[in-house]
């Protein structure tokens, strides 16, 4: 709201300055005409020449002010645009970071969208006068390219990786309607073939026949329908070479087995790619209605992700991010690996906003809340703050509570070890007797519990308000050993707080009564 009001004020000032400038320009034109008019008296021309000089100075100053105001307005517009564009950039960048395979078509599409927002955001930063710049996905700082430029570059990249249009595995026996594999004038693979052999290879087969043979071979030997050749550029290139009669059957099989994509993906992952590519084909033709195996599997994984997210954080994660994560887990056959799912979700462990009785709150939920409460209890039981328990980096900076909770969820930090480290920290400056008990797994709170109860009773205090660092409590155990409770209670009478207790007042009253009786003032 404040930014909007600032921009409005600047615009009002700018409008006023421009109106004033127009008036001065009109005055200058009149003054110039009079100053140069020979019909006017010399005195009047002299007076208007002086006025003309003043107006020129004022106009120059006004133009500078207007230029500054216009720059300020532009900066405010840039700041507004930064806020709007950055929100979209952050959302897309977060989605891109969730993608496991940065070479997948989905990752490339997201990278292009992120880079388009990078251009907008950097242009907005530049307009706002900020020196801040964000980097494109490839690490470069992009500035000045428009969405149209990026779209053109994307079309050029797609053209470079274009592969023949092929059919699904179920259609391999049907005539192919696609244009990329069509007969041509002349021969393919056999020099000097006659005119009647146009479009035939060394074995007298047409391209259509070789295409059908290639897909039949791939399905039989490797269970690879032609949807894979359509969507994997390296496989598509092999298919085209075979169709052009550049490879024999044996060479085609060997090239498939040597293909990097084929070798780097398991049988299960290849099968999932088939489901994905078939689904994408249905999407392009508007026939994806939610009943494909791919869609059902993704929906099932999303439900599992949200259940795991609620277990870890107490809330659902954004649906679009859950779907993006589900697609990655599906394609890499990792959706049943609980450790991987947890690793992808720990980034969502952070304080979330809530509302209790109309009052905004901020805190953790799910397992994160339980672990946070356990950290608090461990710290309190040993007279420490939760910040004292957090590991530190090489510079001595403690890890954030959010960071330690994420590490606990991943199993990289052991709560038992944290508790023991807390006891070691609490042992500093303690008598040997207390150190021994702490080393045996007792908390400081447990060790001093009998003395705290006695102290609460003697001084009529709430036990929870007695700090473990209270000097009166600490005198219960010293270098000489632990004090018996009778001596401890007697020592507490010397504490300044004891005089304000009901017991102290009662004893004072009893003494006063005995004095009065001794002097015969009471019966």
Image: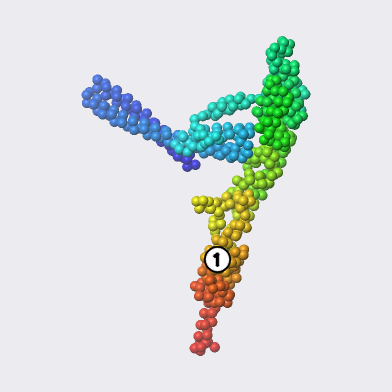
Q: Give residue 344's position: percent from left, percent from top.
A: 63, 44
Colouring: rainbow
Viewer can see residue 458? no
Image quadrant for the C terminus?
bottom right
**Quarter where residue 320 is shown:** top right
Q: Residue at x 77, y 22 (%)?
A: 174
Q: Residue at x 24, y 20 (%)?
A: 38
**Compared with residue 384, is residue 325 higher up or lower down, i.e. above or below?**
above
Q: Nearer the viewer, residue 53 or 145?
A: 145
Q: Is residue 59 left or right of residue 276?
A: left
Q: Residue at x 56, y 54 (%)?
A: 390
Residue, far left = 42
**Compared with residue 380, is residue 217 higher up or lower down, i.e. above or below?**
above
Q: Give residue 288's position: percent from left, percent from top.
A: 71, 32
How many numbered discs, if any? 1
Residue, far top = 195
Q: Is residue 237 left or right of residue 512?
A: right
Q: Nearer the viewer, residue 84 or 191?
A: 191
Residue assigned mark 1: 468
Q: Give residue 382's position: percent from left, percent from top.
A: 57, 62
Q: Residue at x 49, y 88 (%)?
A: 519
What element does badge 1 sit on?
Answer: loop
Q: Nearer the viewer, residue 205 or 453?
A: 205
Q: Residues within 10 Å of mark 1 (few under 14, many from 20)?
A: many
Residue, far bottom = 520
Q: Nearer the viewer, residue 4 or 239?
A: 239
Q: Give residue 462's position: percent from left, percent from top.
A: 57, 67
**Compared with residue 167, is residue 201 higher up or lower down, i.e. above or below?**
above
């Amino acid at each position: 709201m404040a930014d909007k009001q600032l921009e409005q004020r600047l615009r009002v000032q700018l409008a006023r300055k421009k109106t004033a400038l127009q008036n001065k320009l009109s005055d200058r034109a009149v003054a110039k005409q009079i100053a140069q008019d020979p019909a006017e008296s010399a005195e009047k021309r002299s007076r208007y020449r002086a006025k003309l000089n003043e107006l020129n100075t004022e106009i120059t100053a006004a133009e500078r002010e207007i230029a500054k105001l216009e720059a300020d307005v532009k900066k405010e517009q840039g700041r507004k645009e930064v806020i709007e564009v950055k929100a979209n950039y952050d959302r897309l960048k977060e989605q891109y970071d969730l993608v496991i395979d940065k070479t997948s078509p989905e990752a490339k599409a997201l990278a292009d969208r992120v880079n388009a927002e990078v251009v907008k955001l950097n242009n907005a930063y530049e307009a706002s006068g900020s020196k801040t710049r964000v980097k494109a996905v490839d690490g470069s700082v992009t500035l000045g390219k428009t969405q149209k430029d990026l779209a053109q570059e994307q079309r050029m990249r797609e053209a470079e990786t274009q592969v023949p249009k092929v059919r699904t595995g179920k259609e391999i026996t049907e005539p192919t309607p696609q244009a990329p594999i069509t007969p041509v004038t002349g021969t393919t693979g056999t020099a000097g073939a006659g005119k009647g052999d146009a479009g035939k290879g060394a074995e007298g087969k047409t391209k259509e026949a070789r295409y059908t043979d290639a897909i039949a071979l791939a399905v039989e030997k490797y269970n690879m329908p032609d949807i894979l050749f359509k969507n994997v550029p390296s496989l598509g290139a092999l298919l085209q070479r075979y169709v052009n009669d550049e490879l024999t059957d044996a060479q085609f099989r060997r090239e498939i087995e040597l293909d990097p994509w084929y070798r780097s993906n398991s049988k299960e992952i290849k099968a999932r790619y088939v489901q994905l590519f078939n689904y994408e084909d249905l999407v392009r033709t508007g026939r994806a209605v939610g009943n494909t195996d791919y869609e059902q599997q993704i929906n099932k994984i999303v439900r599992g992700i949200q259940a795991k997210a609620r277990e870890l954080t107490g809330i659902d994660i954004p649906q679009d991010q859950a779907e993006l994560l589900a697609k990655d887990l599906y394609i890499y056959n990792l959706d049943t690996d609980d450790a991987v799912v947890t690793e992808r979700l720990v980034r969502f462990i952070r304080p979330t906003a809530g509302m209790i009785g109309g009052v905004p709150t901020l805190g953790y939920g799910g397992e994160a809340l339980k672990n946070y409460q356990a950290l608090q209890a461990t710290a309190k039981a040993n007279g420490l703050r939760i910040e004292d328990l957090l590991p530190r980096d090489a510079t001595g900076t403690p890890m954030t509570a959010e960071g330690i909770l994420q590490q606990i969820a991943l199993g990289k930090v052991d709560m038992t070890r944290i508790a023991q480290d807390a006891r070691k920290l609490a042992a500093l400056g303690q008598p040997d007797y207390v150190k021994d008990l702490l080393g045996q797994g007792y908390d400081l709170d447990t060790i001093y519990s009998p003395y705290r109860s006695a102290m609460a009773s003697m001084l009529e205090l709430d036990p929870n308000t007695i700090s473990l660092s209270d000097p009166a409590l600490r005198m219960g155990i010293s270098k000489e050993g632990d004090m018996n409770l009778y001596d401890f209670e007697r020592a507490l009478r010397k504490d300044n707080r004891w005089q304000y207790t009901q017991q102290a007042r009662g004893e004072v009253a009893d003494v006063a009564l005995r004095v009065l009786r001794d002097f015969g003032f009471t019966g």
